Image: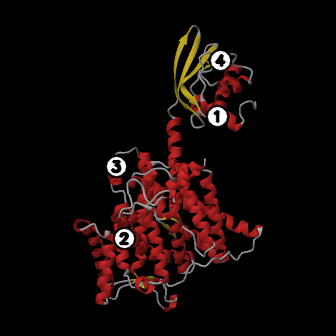
Amino acid sequence: MPRRLLAYAADNLSFSDPDAPLTPTRLRIEALSGLTVALALVPEAVAFAFVAGVHPLVGLYAAFIVGLITALIGGRPGMISGATGALAVVMVSLVAQHGVEYLFATVVLMGLIQIFVGIMRWGKFIRLVPHPVMLGFVNGLAIVIFLAQMSQFQVPGTAESGGHGLANGAWLSGAPLYLMLALVALTMFIIWVMPRITAIIPAPLAGIGIVAAIVIGFGLDVPRVGDLASIEGGLPPFHIPAVPFTWETFMIILPYSLILSAIGLIESLLTLNLVGEMTNKRGGASQECVAQGIANTVTGVFGGMGGCAMIGQSMINVKSGGRTRVAGVVAALFLLSFILFASGLIEQIPLAALVGVMFMVVIGTFAWNSLTILAKVPPMDAFVTILVTIVTVMTDLATAVVVGVIVSALAYSWSNAKRIYANTELLDGSKIYKINGPLFFGSSDGFGELFEIDTDPDLVIIDFAGSRVADQSALQAIEAVSGKYEAAGKRIQLRHLSRDCHMLLSKAGHLMIDSDDDPDYEIAADYGVKTGILGSH
Protein backbone atom coordinates (compact mmCIF):
# COMPACT_ATOMS: atom_id res chain seq x y z
CA MET A 1 0.00 0.00 0.00
CA PRO A 2 2.73 2.60 0.77
CA ARG A 3 4.25 1.92 -2.65
CA ARG A 4 0.88 2.54 -4.29
CA LEU A 5 0.50 5.82 -2.43
CA LEU A 6 3.98 6.92 -3.46
CA ALA A 7 3.27 5.99 -7.07
CA TYR A 8 -0.02 7.89 -6.96
CA ALA A 9 1.68 10.98 -5.58
CA ALA A 10 4.47 10.76 -8.14
CA ASP A 11 1.98 10.52 -11.01
CA ASN A 12 -0.34 13.27 -9.83
CA LEU A 13 2.18 15.78 -8.51
CA SER A 14 4.63 15.44 -11.38
CA PHE A 15 5.23 18.67 -13.25
CA SER A 16 5.48 16.90 -16.57
CA ASP A 17 4.09 14.00 -18.51
CA PRO A 18 5.55 11.55 -21.06
CA ASP A 19 4.37 13.77 -23.91
CA ALA A 20 5.99 16.93 -22.51
CA PRO A 21 9.34 16.23 -20.79
CA LEU A 22 10.84 19.23 -19.01
CA THR A 23 13.64 20.11 -21.39
CA PRO A 24 15.02 23.69 -21.43
CA THR A 25 12.88 24.40 -24.50
CA ARG A 26 9.78 23.03 -22.79
CA LEU A 27 10.47 25.11 -19.65
CA ARG A 28 10.79 28.26 -21.78
CA ILE A 29 7.48 27.54 -23.52
CA GLU A 30 5.76 26.82 -20.23
CA ALA A 31 7.12 29.97 -18.58
CA LEU A 32 6.11 32.24 -21.46
CA SER A 33 2.68 30.61 -21.61
CA GLY A 34 2.27 31.19 -17.88
CA LEU A 35 3.21 34.86 -18.29
CA THR A 36 0.61 35.25 -21.04
CA VAL A 37 -2.07 33.69 -18.86
CA ALA A 38 -1.14 35.89 -15.89
CA LEU A 39 -1.51 39.04 -17.99
CA ALA A 40 -4.96 37.91 -19.13
CA LEU A 41 -5.96 37.00 -15.56
CA VAL A 42 -5.50 40.51 -14.15
CA PRO A 43 -8.46 42.31 -15.78
CA GLU A 44 -10.66 39.24 -15.43
CA ALA A 45 -10.04 38.93 -11.68
CA VAL A 46 -10.58 42.66 -11.14
CA ALA A 47 -13.80 42.68 -13.20
CA PHE A 48 -15.24 39.65 -11.37
CA ALA A 49 -14.40 41.22 -8.02
CA PHE A 50 -16.45 44.25 -9.04
CA VAL A 51 -19.31 41.95 -10.07
CA ALA A 52 -19.26 40.27 -6.63
CA GLY A 53 -19.09 43.64 -4.88
CA VAL A 54 -15.69 43.12 -3.22
CA HIS A 55 -12.28 44.83 -3.38
CA PRO A 56 -10.20 43.99 -6.51
CA LEU A 57 -7.49 42.38 -4.36
CA VAL A 58 -10.06 39.82 -3.16
CA GLY A 59 -10.40 38.67 -6.76
CA LEU A 60 -6.65 38.80 -7.43
CA TYR A 61 -5.84 36.80 -4.29
CA ALA A 62 -8.38 34.18 -5.33
CA ALA A 63 -6.85 33.96 -8.80
CA PHE A 64 -3.39 33.47 -7.28
CA ILE A 65 -4.28 30.91 -4.60
CA VAL A 66 -6.80 28.86 -6.58
CA GLY A 67 -4.57 28.97 -9.66
CA LEU A 68 -1.48 27.84 -7.73
CA ILE A 69 -3.08 24.97 -5.81
CA THR A 70 -5.01 23.54 -8.75
CA ALA A 71 -1.93 23.81 -10.94
CA LEU A 72 0.00 21.73 -8.41
CA ILE A 73 -2.53 18.99 -7.64
CA GLY A 74 -5.36 19.38 -10.17
CA GLY A 75 -6.71 16.63 -12.36
CA ARG A 76 -5.30 17.90 -15.65
CA PRO A 77 -1.99 19.64 -16.41
CA GLY A 78 -2.61 22.66 -18.59
CA MET A 79 -5.79 23.82 -16.88
CA ILE A 80 -5.99 27.30 -15.41
CA SER A 81 -8.24 28.20 -12.47
CA GLY A 82 -9.12 31.50 -10.82
CA ALA A 83 -11.94 33.86 -9.94
CA THR A 84 -14.80 33.45 -12.43
CA GLY A 85 -17.93 35.33 -13.42
CA ALA A 86 -20.17 32.28 -12.98
CA LEU A 87 -19.39 32.31 -9.25
CA ALA A 88 -19.32 36.10 -8.90
CA VAL A 89 -22.94 36.53 -9.99
CA VAL A 90 -24.03 34.19 -7.16
CA MET A 91 -21.82 35.90 -4.58
CA VAL A 92 -23.13 39.41 -5.15
CA SER A 93 -26.39 38.92 -3.22
CA LEU A 94 -24.59 37.29 -0.28
CA VAL A 95 -22.09 40.15 -0.03
CA ALA A 96 -24.85 42.76 -0.36
CA GLN A 97 -26.94 41.21 2.43
CA HIS A 98 -24.34 39.94 4.89
CA GLY A 99 -20.94 41.39 3.99
CA VAL A 100 -17.63 40.06 2.70
CA GLU A 101 -16.81 38.07 5.88
CA TYR A 102 -19.76 35.80 5.18
CA LEU A 103 -18.42 35.35 1.66
CA PHE A 104 -15.10 34.09 3.04
CA ALA A 105 -16.94 31.62 5.31
CA THR A 106 -19.08 30.49 2.37
CA VAL A 107 -15.99 29.86 0.23
CA VAL A 108 -14.47 27.70 3.00
CA LEU A 109 -17.62 25.57 3.23
CA MET A 110 -17.81 25.46 -0.56
CA GLY A 111 -14.32 23.99 -0.64
CA LEU A 112 -15.14 21.37 1.99
CA ILE A 113 -18.18 20.26 -0.03
CA GLN A 114 -16.03 19.94 -3.15
CA ILE A 115 -13.47 17.86 -1.26
CA PHE A 116 -16.26 15.54 -0.11
CA VAL A 117 -17.51 15.18 -3.70
CA GLY A 118 -14.02 14.28 -4.83
CA ILE A 119 -13.47 11.74 -2.04
CA MET A 120 -16.79 10.11 -2.93
CA ARG A 121 -15.59 10.01 -6.56
CA TRP A 122 -18.75 11.66 -7.83
CA GLY A 123 -16.79 13.58 -10.42
CA LYS A 124 -17.14 10.60 -12.75
CA PHE A 125 -20.78 11.51 -13.32
CA ILE A 126 -19.63 14.28 -15.64
CA ARG A 127 -19.48 11.55 -18.28
CA LEU A 128 -23.29 11.66 -18.31
CA VAL A 129 -23.13 15.03 -20.10
CA PRO A 130 -24.10 14.29 -23.74
CA HIS A 131 -22.12 15.60 -26.68
CA PRO A 132 -24.84 18.06 -27.81
CA VAL A 133 -24.71 19.60 -24.33
CA MET A 134 -20.92 19.94 -24.61
CA LEU A 135 -21.31 21.66 -27.99
CA GLY A 136 -23.88 24.07 -26.61
CA PHE A 137 -21.74 24.68 -23.54
CA VAL A 138 -18.66 25.53 -25.62
CA ASN A 139 -20.59 27.77 -28.01
CA GLY A 140 -22.41 29.54 -25.19
CA LEU A 141 -19.14 30.04 -23.35
CA ALA A 142 -17.55 31.60 -26.43
CA ILE A 143 -20.45 34.05 -26.69
CA VAL A 144 -20.22 34.86 -22.96
CA ILE A 145 -16.48 35.56 -23.25
CA PHE A 146 -17.17 37.81 -26.25
CA LEU A 147 -19.92 39.73 -24.48
CA ALA A 148 -17.76 40.12 -21.37
CA GLN A 149 -15.22 42.06 -23.44
CA MET A 150 -17.80 44.65 -24.42
CA SER A 151 -17.40 46.43 -21.09
CA GLN A 152 -13.84 47.30 -22.09
CA PHE A 153 -15.26 49.60 -24.76
CA GLN A 154 -16.76 51.87 -22.12
CA VAL A 155 -15.33 55.14 -20.86
CA PRO A 156 -13.01 54.69 -17.83
CA GLY A 157 -14.60 55.29 -14.42
CA THR A 158 -15.16 58.87 -13.37
CA ALA A 159 -14.96 60.56 -10.00
CA GLU A 160 -18.63 59.77 -9.42
CA SER A 161 -17.84 56.07 -9.66
CA GLY A 162 -14.89 56.34 -7.30
CA GLY A 163 -12.32 56.42 -10.07
CA HIS A 164 -12.45 52.64 -10.52
CA GLY A 165 -14.04 50.41 -13.10
CA LEU A 166 -15.98 51.56 -16.12
CA ALA A 167 -18.81 54.06 -16.27
CA ASN A 168 -22.22 52.49 -16.77
CA GLY A 169 -23.58 53.06 -20.27
CA ALA A 170 -20.84 55.54 -21.30
CA TRP A 171 -19.45 53.93 -24.45
CA LEU A 172 -16.40 55.02 -26.35
CA SER A 173 -17.17 56.86 -29.58
CA GLY A 174 -15.42 58.69 -32.34
CA ALA A 175 -11.62 58.64 -32.50
CA PRO A 176 -11.12 56.80 -29.14
CA LEU A 177 -13.40 53.99 -30.31
CA TYR A 178 -11.67 53.69 -33.69
CA LEU A 179 -8.26 53.65 -32.01
CA MET A 180 -9.42 50.96 -29.60
CA LEU A 181 -10.78 48.82 -32.44
CA ALA A 182 -7.60 49.30 -34.46
CA LEU A 183 -5.45 48.10 -31.54
CA VAL A 184 -7.74 45.11 -30.98
CA ALA A 185 -7.48 44.21 -34.67
CA LEU A 186 -3.69 44.64 -34.58
CA THR A 187 -3.42 42.32 -31.59
CA MET A 188 -5.53 39.68 -33.33
CA PHE A 189 -3.45 39.99 -36.50
CA ILE A 190 -0.20 39.54 -34.56
CA ILE A 191 -1.61 36.44 -32.83
CA TRP A 192 -2.66 35.05 -36.21
CA VAL A 193 0.58 35.75 -38.05
CA MET A 194 3.15 35.13 -35.28
CA PRO A 195 3.11 31.30 -35.49
CA ARG A 196 3.98 31.63 -39.18
CA ILE A 197 7.05 33.70 -38.27
CA THR A 198 8.41 32.10 -35.11
CA ALA A 199 7.41 29.76 -32.30
CA ILE A 200 9.91 31.14 -29.81
CA ILE A 201 7.37 33.49 -28.20
CA PRO A 202 3.70 32.49 -27.68
CA ALA A 203 1.55 34.43 -30.12
CA PRO A 204 -0.76 35.95 -27.46
CA LEU A 205 2.23 37.21 -25.47
CA ALA A 206 3.71 38.73 -28.62
CA GLY A 207 0.41 40.46 -29.36
CA ILE A 208 0.20 41.94 -25.86
CA GLY A 209 3.85 42.99 -25.83
CA ILE A 210 3.92 44.68 -29.25
CA VAL A 211 0.63 46.55 -28.79
CA ALA A 212 1.61 47.63 -25.26
CA ALA A 213 4.95 48.91 -26.58
CA ILE A 214 3.19 50.93 -29.29
CA VAL A 215 0.69 52.43 -26.83
CA ILE A 216 3.29 53.29 -24.18
CA GLY A 217 5.91 54.43 -26.70
CA PHE A 218 3.58 56.81 -28.52
CA GLY A 219 1.63 57.79 -25.39
CA LEU A 220 -1.71 56.82 -26.95
CA ASP A 221 -4.73 57.76 -24.87
CA VAL A 222 -6.61 54.45 -24.62
CA PRO A 223 -8.13 52.54 -21.66
CA ARG A 224 -5.54 50.62 -19.68
CA VAL A 225 -5.57 48.02 -16.91
CA GLY A 226 -5.01 50.76 -14.33
CA ASP A 227 -8.31 52.35 -15.36
CA LEU A 228 -10.11 49.33 -13.88
CA ALA A 229 -8.42 49.54 -10.47
CA SER A 230 -5.05 49.59 -8.78
CA ILE A 231 -3.68 46.07 -8.37
CA GLU A 232 -0.98 47.04 -5.87
CA GLY A 233 -1.03 45.06 -2.64
CA GLY A 234 0.83 42.72 -0.30
CA LEU A 235 0.83 38.99 0.37
CA PRO A 236 -2.59 37.44 1.02
CA PRO A 237 -3.13 37.73 4.80
CA PHE A 238 -4.24 34.71 6.86
CA HIS A 239 -7.68 35.62 8.11
CA ILE A 240 -10.30 33.45 9.82
CA PRO A 241 -13.70 34.70 8.62
CA ALA A 242 -15.09 37.07 11.26
CA VAL A 243 -18.56 35.53 11.50
CA PRO A 244 -20.43 34.04 14.46
CA PHE A 245 -19.83 30.30 14.60
CA THR A 246 -23.51 29.50 15.10
CA TRP A 247 -26.19 27.37 13.49
CA GLU A 248 -27.79 30.52 12.11
CA THR A 249 -24.59 31.43 10.28
CA PHE A 250 -24.32 27.91 8.92
CA MET A 251 -27.87 28.07 7.54
CA ILE A 252 -27.09 31.41 5.88
CA ILE A 253 -23.97 30.23 4.07
CA LEU A 254 -25.03 26.62 3.31
CA PRO A 255 -27.35 27.37 0.33
CA TYR A 256 -24.74 29.63 -1.25
CA SER A 257 -21.99 27.06 -0.62
CA LEU A 258 -23.99 24.30 -2.28
CA ILE A 259 -24.76 26.42 -5.34
CA LEU A 260 -21.20 27.70 -5.65
CA SER A 261 -19.68 24.23 -5.23
CA ALA A 262 -21.99 22.80 -7.89
CA ILE A 263 -21.32 25.61 -10.37
CA GLY A 264 -17.59 25.46 -9.72
CA LEU A 265 -17.35 21.70 -10.16
CA ILE A 266 -19.51 21.60 -13.29
CA GLU A 267 -17.46 24.32 -14.97
CA SER A 268 -14.19 22.74 -13.81
CA LEU A 269 -15.07 19.24 -14.95
CA LEU A 270 -16.31 20.42 -18.33
CA THR A 271 -13.06 22.36 -18.72
CA LEU A 272 -11.21 19.17 -17.74
CA ASN A 273 -12.94 17.31 -20.56
CA LEU A 274 -12.34 20.10 -23.07
CA VAL A 275 -8.63 20.36 -22.25
CA GLY A 276 -8.44 16.57 -22.27
CA GLU A 277 -9.75 16.45 -25.82
CA MET A 278 -7.14 18.99 -26.92
CA THR A 279 -4.24 17.24 -25.17
CA ASN A 280 -5.45 13.63 -25.60
CA LYS A 281 -5.67 13.06 -21.85
CA ARG A 282 -8.41 11.32 -19.89
CA GLY A 283 -9.40 10.83 -16.26
CA GLY A 284 -8.68 12.98 -13.24
CA ALA A 285 -12.26 14.11 -12.50
CA SER A 286 -12.29 13.16 -8.82
CA GLN A 287 -8.77 14.50 -8.33
CA GLU A 288 -9.88 17.81 -9.85
CA CYS A 289 -12.81 17.97 -7.40
CA VAL A 290 -10.46 17.51 -4.45
CA ALA A 291 -8.01 20.06 -5.82
CA GLN A 292 -10.74 22.65 -6.36
CA GLY A 293 -12.00 21.98 -2.83
CA ILE A 294 -8.60 22.38 -1.20
CA ALA A 295 -7.95 25.54 -3.23
CA ASN A 296 -11.24 27.16 -2.20
CA THR A 297 -10.87 26.17 1.45
CA VAL A 298 -7.44 27.79 1.57
CA THR A 299 -8.65 30.81 -0.39
CA GLY A 300 -11.44 31.43 2.10
CA VAL A 301 -8.98 31.82 4.99
CA PHE A 302 -6.65 34.06 2.98
CA GLY A 303 -9.15 36.70 1.93
CA GLY A 304 -10.04 35.37 -1.52
CA MET A 305 -13.42 35.11 -3.24
CA GLY A 306 -12.95 31.53 -4.39
CA GLY A 307 -12.91 30.26 -7.94
CA CYS A 308 -12.92 27.38 -10.38
CA ALA A 309 -11.45 26.39 -13.74
CA MET A 310 -11.43 29.10 -16.40
CA ILE A 311 -11.99 27.83 -19.91
CA GLY A 312 -10.86 31.03 -21.63
CA GLN A 313 -7.51 31.16 -19.81
CA SER A 314 -7.10 27.39 -20.16
CA MET A 315 -7.49 27.78 -23.92
CA ILE A 316 -4.88 30.57 -23.92
CA ASN A 317 -2.50 28.31 -22.01
CA VAL A 318 -2.97 25.23 -24.17
CA LYS A 319 -2.76 27.15 -27.43
CA SER A 320 0.35 28.97 -26.19
CA GLY A 321 2.03 25.60 -25.67
CA GLY A 322 1.32 24.96 -21.99
CA ARG A 323 1.16 21.22 -21.41
CA THR A 324 2.50 20.67 -17.88
CA ARG A 325 1.84 21.98 -14.39
CA VAL A 326 4.69 24.46 -14.74
CA ALA A 327 2.63 26.92 -16.81
CA GLY A 328 -0.14 27.12 -14.21
CA VAL A 329 2.33 27.55 -11.36
CA VAL A 330 4.25 30.22 -13.28
CA ALA A 331 1.00 32.06 -14.08
CA ALA A 332 0.06 32.16 -10.39
CA LEU A 333 3.53 33.32 -9.32
CA PHE A 334 3.61 36.02 -12.02
CA LEU A 335 0.20 37.21 -10.85
CA LEU A 336 1.50 37.51 -7.27
CA SER A 337 4.59 39.35 -8.48
CA PHE A 338 2.37 41.80 -10.35
CA ILE A 339 0.56 42.56 -7.09
CA LEU A 340 3.75 42.90 -5.05
CA PHE A 341 6.28 44.49 -7.39
CA ALA A 342 5.01 45.34 -10.88
CA SER A 343 1.59 46.88 -10.43
CA GLY A 344 2.67 50.19 -11.99
CA LEU A 345 3.92 48.47 -15.15
CA ILE A 346 0.99 46.08 -15.53
CA GLU A 347 -1.48 48.93 -15.09
CA GLN A 348 -0.03 50.52 -18.25
CA ILE A 349 -1.02 47.58 -20.47
CA PRO A 350 -3.79 48.65 -22.87
CA LEU A 351 -7.06 46.83 -22.47
CA ALA A 352 -7.27 46.60 -26.27
CA ALA A 353 -4.42 44.08 -26.29
CA LEU A 354 -6.14 41.84 -23.74
CA VAL A 355 -9.46 42.18 -25.58
CA GLY A 356 -7.74 41.07 -28.78
CA VAL A 357 -6.37 38.00 -27.03
CA MET A 358 -9.82 37.09 -25.68
CA PHE A 359 -11.42 37.62 -29.09
CA MET A 360 -8.97 35.09 -30.53
CA VAL A 361 -9.94 32.75 -27.69
CA VAL A 362 -13.58 33.20 -28.70
CA ILE A 363 -12.76 32.29 -32.32
CA GLY A 364 -10.81 29.24 -31.21
CA THR A 365 -13.36 28.11 -28.61
CA PHE A 366 -16.57 28.34 -30.65
CA ALA A 367 -17.36 24.99 -32.31
CA TRP A 368 -17.86 26.34 -35.82
CA ASN A 369 -18.46 22.85 -37.22
CA SER A 370 -21.59 22.66 -35.09
CA LEU A 371 -23.23 25.19 -37.42
CA THR A 372 -22.93 22.76 -40.32
CA ILE A 373 -23.89 19.58 -38.47
CA LEU A 374 -27.07 20.96 -36.91
CA ALA A 375 -28.97 20.05 -40.07
CA LYS A 376 -27.45 16.56 -40.13
CA VAL A 377 -27.91 15.38 -36.55
CA PRO A 378 -31.27 14.28 -35.06
CA PRO A 379 -33.57 17.27 -34.46
CA MET A 380 -33.55 16.73 -30.70
CA ASP A 381 -29.74 16.87 -30.56
CA ALA A 382 -29.78 20.09 -32.57
CA PHE A 383 -32.43 21.51 -30.24
CA VAL A 384 -30.38 20.63 -27.14
CA THR A 385 -27.26 22.26 -28.61
CA ILE A 386 -29.12 25.49 -29.35
CA LEU A 387 -30.97 25.40 -26.01
CA VAL A 388 -27.78 25.00 -23.96
CA THR A 389 -26.13 27.80 -25.92
CA ILE A 390 -29.02 30.18 -25.22
CA VAL A 391 -29.35 29.24 -21.54
CA THR A 392 -25.59 29.65 -21.08
CA VAL A 393 -25.77 33.19 -22.40
CA MET A 394 -28.98 34.10 -20.55
CA THR A 395 -28.16 32.55 -17.15
CA ASP A 396 -24.96 30.69 -16.32
CA LEU A 397 -22.96 27.68 -17.44
CA ALA A 398 -24.02 25.31 -14.67
CA THR A 399 -27.74 25.97 -15.17
CA ALA A 400 -27.33 25.45 -18.91
CA VAL A 401 -25.59 22.10 -18.45
CA VAL A 402 -28.22 20.88 -15.97
CA VAL A 403 -31.02 21.94 -18.32
CA GLY A 404 -29.30 20.25 -21.25
CA VAL A 405 -28.78 16.98 -19.37
CA ILE A 406 -32.40 16.92 -18.17
CA VAL A 407 -33.81 17.60 -21.65
CA SER A 408 -31.49 14.99 -23.18
CA ALA A 409 -32.52 12.42 -20.56
CA LEU A 410 -36.21 13.11 -21.12
CA ALA A 411 -35.74 12.87 -24.88
CA TYR A 412 -33.90 9.57 -24.49
CA SER A 413 -36.60 8.21 -22.19
CA TRP A 414 -39.35 9.26 -24.60
CA SER A 415 -37.53 7.69 -27.51
CA ASN A 416 -37.14 4.39 -25.65
CA ALA A 417 -40.71 4.56 -24.39
CA LYS A 418 -41.94 4.30 -27.98
CA ARG A 419 -39.73 1.32 -28.78
CA ILE A 420 -41.72 -1.28 -26.85
CA TYR A 421 -43.91 -3.58 -28.97
CA ALA A 422 -45.01 -7.21 -29.08
CA ASN A 423 -45.06 -9.96 -31.70
CA THR A 424 -47.85 -12.44 -31.11
CA GLU A 425 -48.54 -16.01 -32.18
CA LEU A 426 -51.06 -18.70 -31.34
CA LEU A 427 -49.75 -22.11 -30.22
CA ASP A 428 -51.77 -25.07 -28.92
CA GLY A 429 -54.65 -22.97 -27.71
CA SER A 430 -52.47 -20.37 -26.04
CA LYS A 431 -51.31 -16.92 -27.15
CA ILE A 432 -47.68 -15.86 -26.90
CA TYR A 433 -46.71 -12.19 -26.58
CA LYS A 434 -43.02 -11.73 -27.44
CA ILE A 435 -42.10 -8.38 -25.88
CA ASN A 436 -39.43 -6.26 -27.55
CA GLY A 437 -37.86 -3.07 -26.22
CA PRO A 438 -37.01 -1.81 -22.72
CA LEU A 439 -39.70 -1.87 -20.05
CA PHE A 440 -39.30 1.03 -17.63
CA PHE A 441 -41.29 3.93 -16.25
CA GLY A 442 -41.57 5.59 -19.65
CA SER A 443 -42.88 2.52 -21.48
CA SER A 444 -45.02 0.97 -18.72
CA ASP A 445 -48.26 2.51 -20.05
CA GLY A 446 -47.46 1.38 -23.59
CA PHE A 447 -46.78 -2.12 -22.26
CA GLY A 448 -50.25 -2.34 -20.77
CA GLU A 449 -51.81 -1.35 -24.09
CA LEU A 450 -50.21 -4.30 -25.94
CA PHE A 451 -52.63 -6.91 -24.57
CA GLU A 452 -56.13 -7.89 -25.76
CA ILE A 453 -57.35 -9.29 -22.47
CA ASP A 454 -61.02 -9.77 -23.44
CA THR A 455 -60.33 -11.73 -26.64
CA ASP A 456 -57.23 -13.66 -25.56
CA PRO A 457 -57.49 -17.44 -24.88
CA ASP A 458 -57.44 -18.90 -21.39
CA LEU A 459 -53.63 -19.29 -21.37
CA VAL A 460 -51.41 -16.34 -22.20
CA ILE A 461 -47.60 -16.49 -22.32
CA ILE A 462 -45.55 -13.28 -22.09
CA ASP A 463 -41.97 -13.78 -23.26
CA PHE A 464 -39.43 -11.12 -22.16
CA ALA A 465 -36.45 -12.54 -24.07
CA GLY A 466 -36.30 -9.40 -26.25
CA SER A 467 -36.95 -6.97 -23.42
CA ARG A 468 -35.30 -5.69 -20.27
CA VAL A 469 -37.11 -4.94 -17.03
CA ALA A 470 -35.47 -1.86 -15.57
CA ASP A 471 -37.33 -0.41 -12.58
CA GLN A 472 -40.23 -0.62 -10.14
CA SER A 473 -42.65 0.95 -12.63
CA ALA A 474 -41.94 -1.95 -15.00
CA LEU A 475 -42.56 -4.54 -12.28
CA GLN A 476 -45.77 -2.78 -11.30
CA ALA A 477 -46.92 -2.78 -14.94
CA ILE A 478 -46.34 -6.55 -15.19
CA GLU A 479 -48.27 -7.15 -11.98
CA ALA A 480 -51.12 -4.91 -13.20
CA VAL A 481 -51.44 -6.84 -16.46
CA SER A 482 -51.31 -10.13 -14.57
CA GLY A 483 -54.05 -8.94 -12.22
CA LYS A 484 -56.31 -8.05 -15.17
CA TYR A 485 -55.88 -11.52 -16.69
CA GLU A 486 -56.64 -13.14 -13.32
CA ALA A 487 -59.75 -10.99 -12.95
CA ALA A 488 -60.84 -12.22 -16.39
CA GLY A 489 -60.43 -15.84 -15.24
CA LYS A 490 -57.38 -16.52 -17.42
CA ARG A 491 -53.97 -17.94 -16.68
CA ILE A 492 -50.69 -16.24 -17.50
CA GLN A 493 -47.10 -17.43 -17.80
CA LEU A 494 -44.05 -15.14 -17.75
CA ARG A 495 -40.88 -16.25 -19.46
CA HIS A 496 -37.32 -14.92 -19.50
CA LEU A 497 -37.82 -12.71 -16.46
CA SER A 498 -35.14 -12.50 -13.80
CA ARG A 499 -35.67 -14.67 -10.76
CA ASP A 500 -35.89 -11.54 -8.63
CA CYS A 501 -38.89 -10.47 -10.66
CA HIS A 502 -40.35 -13.93 -10.10
CA MET A 503 -39.86 -13.51 -6.37
CA LEU A 504 -41.80 -10.27 -6.38
CA LEU A 505 -44.58 -11.29 -8.75
CA SER A 506 -45.15 -14.79 -7.36
CA LYS A 507 -46.12 -13.25 -4.03
CA ALA A 508 -49.22 -11.93 -5.76
CA GLY A 509 -50.35 -15.57 -5.65
CA HIS A 510 -51.89 -15.76 -9.11
CA LEU A 511 -48.93 -16.26 -11.49
CA MET A 512 -47.75 -19.47 -13.06
CA ILE A 513 -44.05 -18.98 -13.84
CA ASP A 514 -42.09 -20.93 -16.43
CA SER A 515 -38.52 -20.32 -15.25
CA ASP A 516 -36.50 -23.19 -16.70
CA ASP A 517 -34.80 -20.96 -19.29
CA ASP A 518 -34.97 -17.66 -17.42
CA PRO A 519 -31.62 -15.83 -17.14
CA ASP A 520 -30.45 -13.66 -14.27
CA TYR A 521 -30.48 -9.95 -15.10
CA GLU A 522 -28.13 -8.03 -12.84
CA ILE A 523 -29.98 -4.75 -13.39
CA ALA A 524 -33.20 -6.04 -11.91
CA ALA A 525 -31.33 -7.83 -9.14
CA ASP A 526 -29.38 -4.73 -8.16
CA TYR A 527 -32.48 -2.58 -8.31
CA GLY A 528 -34.47 -4.94 -6.14
CA VAL A 529 -31.79 -5.21 -3.49
CA LYS A 530 -31.02 -1.49 -3.37
CA THR A 531 -34.60 -0.32 -3.20
CA GLY A 532 -35.87 -3.05 -0.91
CA ILE A 533 -38.64 -3.95 -3.36
CA LEU A 534 -37.79 -7.63 -3.42
CA GLY A 535 -39.36 -9.42 -0.52
CA SER A 536 -41.40 -6.40 0.52
CA HIS A 537 -44.71 -7.54 -0.99
Q: Amino acid type of disc 1?
A: Asp
- Label 1 and label 4: CA atoms lie apart by 26 Å
Task: Determine the residue located farthest toward the top in the rendered image.
Answer: 428
Q: Residues within 10 Å of mark 3 (few under 14, many from 20)?
A: few
In the rendered image, residue 66, in percent from the top left (x then y), is placed at 54, 68
Indicate the secondary structure of the residue bearing disc 2.
Answer: helix
Above/below status of 328 relative to 387: below
Number of the front mark, 3 or 4: 3
State the residue position of label 3: 373
Q: Of the two numbered discs 3 and 1 on the same chain, state the one appearing first in sequence.
A: 3
Indicate the secondary structure of the residue bearing disc 3.
Answer: helix
Dots 3 and 4: beta carbons under 8 Å?
A: no
Q: Amino acid type of disc 3?
A: Ile
Q: Amino acid type of disc 2?
A: Leu
State the residue position of label 2: 32
Number of the front mark, 2 or 1: 2
Q: Residues within 10 Å of mark 4 (few under 14, many from 20)?
A: many
Q: Of the two numbered discs 2 and 1 on the same chain, state the one appearing first in sequence.
A: 2
* Residue 209 badge: none
In the rendered image, residue 207, in percent from the top left (x then y), is placed at 31, 74
In the rendered image, residue 486, in percent from the top left (x then y), is placed at 70, 20
Of residues 458 and 339, the one drawn nearer to the viewer in this rendering: 339
Q: Residues within 10 Å of mark 1 (few under 14, many from 20)?
A: few
- Label 3 and label 4: CA atoms lie apart by 49 Å
Above/below status of 380 relative to 358: above
Of residues 536 and 230, the one drawn nearer to the viewer in this rendering: 230
Q: Quadrant of the C terminus?
A: top right
Indicate the secondary structure of the residue bearing disc 1.
Answer: helix
Indicate the secondary structure of the residue bearing disc 4.
Answer: strand
Number of the front mark, 3 or 1: 1
State the residue position of label 1: 526
